[in-house]
Image: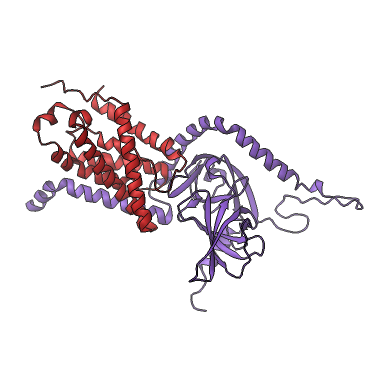
Amino acid sequence: MKNIFLFIRRYLTFLSFLLLQVAAIVMLSNSSKTHQSFFASAANEVTGNINKHYSGFRDYFSLKETNRLLAEENVRLRNMLQSNFSVPDQSRQVFVDTLVKDTLGRSRKFTWLPAKVVGNSYTLQNNFITIERGSNQGVTKGMAAVGSSGIVGVVVETSANFSKIMSLIHRNSKVSAMLKKDESAGSIEWDGTDPGYLTLRNVTKGAKVAKGDTVLTSNYSANFPPKLMIGTVAEISSESSSNFYNLKVKTATNFFSLQYVYLVANVRYAEQVHLENNTPKTP
Amino acid sequence: MSSLLKNIIRFVVFILFQVYILNQVPPLHQYLVPYLYFLFILWLPFNINHFWLLVISFVFGLCLDYFTGTYGLHAAPCVLIAYIRPYLLNLLLPQETMEQSYIEPGHKSMGWAPYALYAGILSFVHHFYLVLIEWLQFGNFVYFLGKVAGTTAISLLMIFLAELLFNRNSRYRATN
């Protein structure tokens, strides 16, 4: 017994070094798998508050750009207003109601919430965006985040008043996508080199791709509504060993100047994910 | 100003500088990531207890991790360089007298050449370990070598700029 204590006393620094190393590695492997470590939410609230003050002061420098983006988006939305479309011969206009069930009997699947960006990283390998809207304001894990010009990421962590979005430019991010032209599906990932470009994998070589083609979110995604803008094809390369293209995609979203995002909740998200994860293994 | 208060202020300033200035720099190249925060550990006093040095470095790395959202990624390299630091200082500072008359490592207390070696070795070890952890998560060997070399070079450049800009009067201790 005495020897054990002597041993611990003698190698105290080395043992504590090992202990701290193991603690750091365990936290790292846990956090990249599940995005939840024990006191992550508490710290998220603290760092979120600091980020909020900083962004409150930095916002003044980008007011012009934000205004321009909002104005552009307003024009685009105004062009889609129902009142712009009317058939001259009919005596009444058709309105789409925003109730859960609209007048045509369609039921709502996606609801949209606005959120302000208070923290944003784009120089690292694992980039996250912090927004000032948390579980108290109706944010849940798995919600999609969409910017004014294209999609941004997926919510991975929420605290009472802040949430963390895994940005598209995160090494673990993966979003189902398709080409606008012929709707052939693939998945959008990031190779960690340039924050302006993503990689679209698993597009079959049968698809007709050209530079400048639009890439949209696909119908297969549980988080994202279909047909939202992701980016445009910038470079086409094909691996000779496989049947798939590797497409370099220029992002539609400018990740360097995010100010506001919209969160999209899928009303049937839990149901879809539950079904997809519980498929019996043997047919 | 007492040494404790000075280091507490440095702790906060280095974290905020790394998070809000260096991490906001638009990426120049995929190999060049500006890291300066670990200079805090290099500047801690000579006579600090080895055990507390490890604990302080762990907490310091973890604080940065909370801002970047990668829990443990920076804490692990910080603990490693804190563990190596006293052995390296023992090698570079053979004279007992030097160690007693100055408080903390710097080009004044050690001389430019040993200080450059000290900063160079520790920042190389830090980046090697940091990029190694990243590389194990998503690998590419050329990327690994290039990033370690590029990042070490830019860190050393910034450390020397910091030394030239901030004239730390690593003063003689008042007692004896």
Report which quarter residue B23 is drawn in: top left
Q: Residue at x 34, y 35 (%)?
A: B158
For the residue pair B99 and B82, the one nearer the viewer reads as: B99
Q: Answer left or right for A185 relative to B96.
A: right
Residue A226's place in the image compared with B125, above or below, is below
Q: Quadrant of the C terminus of chain B?
A: top left
Q: Answer left or right for A158 relative to A79.
A: left
- Residue B22, given in percent of the width and then of the height, sits at 41, 37
For the residue pair A166 and B170, the one nearer the viewer reads as: B170
Q: Answer left or right for B91 relative to B127.
A: left
The extreme left residue here reads A2
Q: Answer left or right for A143 relative to B15.
A: right
- Residue A112, given in percent of the width and then of the height, sits at 63, 48
Q: Colour of chain B?
A: red
Report which quarter residue B47 is drawn in: top left
Asked whether residue A42 appears in the rendered view, the answer is no
- Residue A170, given in percent of the width and then of the height, sits at 47, 52
Q: Residue at x 65, y 64 (%)?
A: A183
For the residue pair A83 and B91, the one nearer the viewer reads as: B91
The extreme bottom residue here reads A283
Q: Colour of chain A?
A: purple
- Residue A263, given in percent of the width and then of the height, sits at 59, 48
Q: Residue at x 22, y 30 (%)?
A: B107
Q: Quadrant of the N terminus of chain B?
A: top left
Number of marks in picture: 0
Asked whether residue B115 appears in the rendered view, the answer is yes
Colour scheme of the picture: by chain
For the residue pair B54 and B80, the one nearer the viewer reads as: B80
